Amino acid sequence: MKKYSVFAIAREAMRGHKGWEEQWSSPEPRKEYDVIIVGAGGHGLATAYYLATVHGITNVAVLEKGWLGGGNTGRNTTIIRSNYLYDESAGIYDHALKLWDGLSQELNYNVMYSARGVMMLAHNVHDIQVLKRHVHANRLNGIDNEWLTPEQAKEFCPPLNISKQARYPVVGAALQRRGGTARHDAVAWGYARGASARGVHIIQNCEVTGVKRAANGAVMGVDTTRGFIGAKKVGVVAAGHSSVIMNMAGVRMPLESYPLQALVSEPVKPVVPCVVMSNTVHAYISQSDKGELVIGAGTDQYVSYSQTGGLHILQHTLDAICEMFPIFTRMKMLRSWGGIVDVTPDRSPILAKTPVPGLYVNCGWGTGGFKATPGSGHVFAHTIAKDDPHPINAPFTIERFRTGRLIDEAAAAAVAH
Amino acid sequence: MLLIRCPYCEEERPELEFRNAGEAHIARSTNMAGESDDDFEKFFFIRSNPKGVIYERWRHMHGCARFFNAVRDTVTDKFFMTYKAGEPKPAKLPGVAK
């Protein structure tokens, strides 16, 4: 792998950019690997990267039915934060946040992590109570979060409407300054490049069609559209399709898959300096470095794999955006799209061993998995390499739905579901 | 937005009038306190989440307010049929060969 640097740019500029190499190779699949990761999204590629760098396991294949980073990694609104209520969630999301800081240097790939601050608005007394509880819980866990008055919120985000005449006036806000955004595609590409350089095979357009198990129940490998590929360890990181893959291994999951939509506006000059979220009116917004306003909408109410959603869901969110930012009422929207998110009953992810020996699953990130990408890959690689969960992901088992030891962020996560 | 046929009102109405109520044909135990942890997990948390044909419950919230069942393809979001609550799972779907 040739290192990217200012000198590389200068060198290539001198010779007509003929020396750039492919960022990752596209090898023919081997007959057998030590570990197969199903799904080349951010989480899957990060898992492969940390298997190689932290645990020295490089005989790894990442199988992807479409193209790398073409699922939810390329469809999310790129928001990063760790202001979750419960200790377990705070642990895993802040682990990720610490890895975001310095990820560009580690990968030698600019993931454009920008700690521009995530501000969550309160619109009524109940919001104030809930958000202040979050501020205190976060601080006890060593996570930065602070309370702002409406005037301070306006100072932090000037286009915000704090008029008392608004239908849902802003009465306060919680601000996590370390929160922000990153370039989602670059995260997948950076991890892919790093993993490929260490010998990991990234095999695109290779859909898993079955999971083979030996007589004793253990995993033997996977059937794919490019034939059978053997492995004693298989990690399923298939987002909205996780329950489909797990069903192939005979494991029924506590998951339901819903379409989640997002949209972007035409590009404009810098106007939104941070991420603004509101639970109560259900809207969140930030501005990409290209200048587009990036807006997240809600999920549809029914199970679907269609990667599209109802227009009324988008309209609902845009109503809220226009209420919070009257300045945007005449802005044109450029594109909208949907991704399929897998949601658990307690809205916390599952990163765990499964009842099937050699089969591991990393799923259930629901509407907010992007922010966790580095941390998720890091602890999931540990779980696969050691056949034992990392202390950070130990609470995120499948068995918690039997024992009742839920991580009930459902009502407590800082965003509406 | 989906158009959904309410089998009680006997007409297609926009999705906004309805509330999805999850997977259908999951029988609630008559002796909930006596359920084992395994059985309770299956009843309460585990879902089939199929890519393809789903049997699901809807409620005509802003219409007759009654629950009913529907069969839908989760890839195309097209409905095969809807039927009244309490009726058995249809053995054959209209417009499907087998």
Image: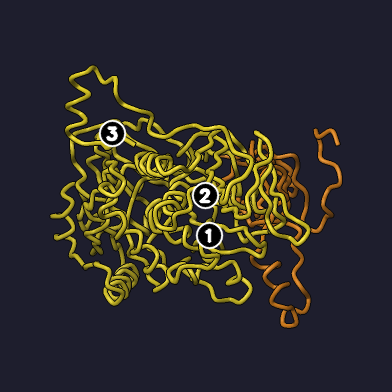
Give the label, 3 or 1, closer to the camera. 1
- Identify the residue shown where x is 36% and y is 30%: A334
Mark 2 Cα shell of 10 Å, populated few (<14), some (14-19), many (≥20): many
Q: Whole-percent x and y of residue B28?
A: 74, 69
Image vertical order of residue B37 relative to residue A36, above or below: below
The yellow one among the chains is A
**Circle 1 chain:** A
Instruction: Answer yes or no: is residue B66 visible.
Output: no
Residue ID for mark 3: A331
Q: Secondary structure at mark 2?
A: strand
Mark 1 Cα shell of 10 Å, populated few (<14), some (14-19), many (≥20): many
Q: Are marks 1 and 2 on the same chain?
A: yes
- Identify the residue shown where x is 42% and y is 49%: A49
Marks 3/1 in contact by CB < 8 Å: the verdict is no
**Circle 2 chain:** A
- Using the rendered view, name the quadrant where residue A130 is placed: bottom left
Q: How far is disc 1 from disc 2 in space, using C-alphas?
A: 23 Å
Q: Secondary structure at mark 1?
A: helix
- Chain B colour as displayed: orange
Report the front residue among A157 and A406.
A406
What kind of colouring is applied to the model shown?
A: by chain
- Identify the residue shown where x is 75% and y is 42%: B81
Rendered image: mark on residue A341: 2
First of labels 1, 2 by sequence position: 2
Marks 1/2 in contact by CB < 8 Å: the verdict is no
Instruction: Answer yes or no: is residue A289 visible.
Output: yes
Report the front residue among A400 and A318.
A400
Report the front residue among A48 and A98.
A48
Give the label, 3 or 2, closer to the camera. 2
Q: Amino acid at mark 1?
A: Ile
Rendered image: mark on residue A384: 1
Q: Amino acid at mark 3?
A: Met
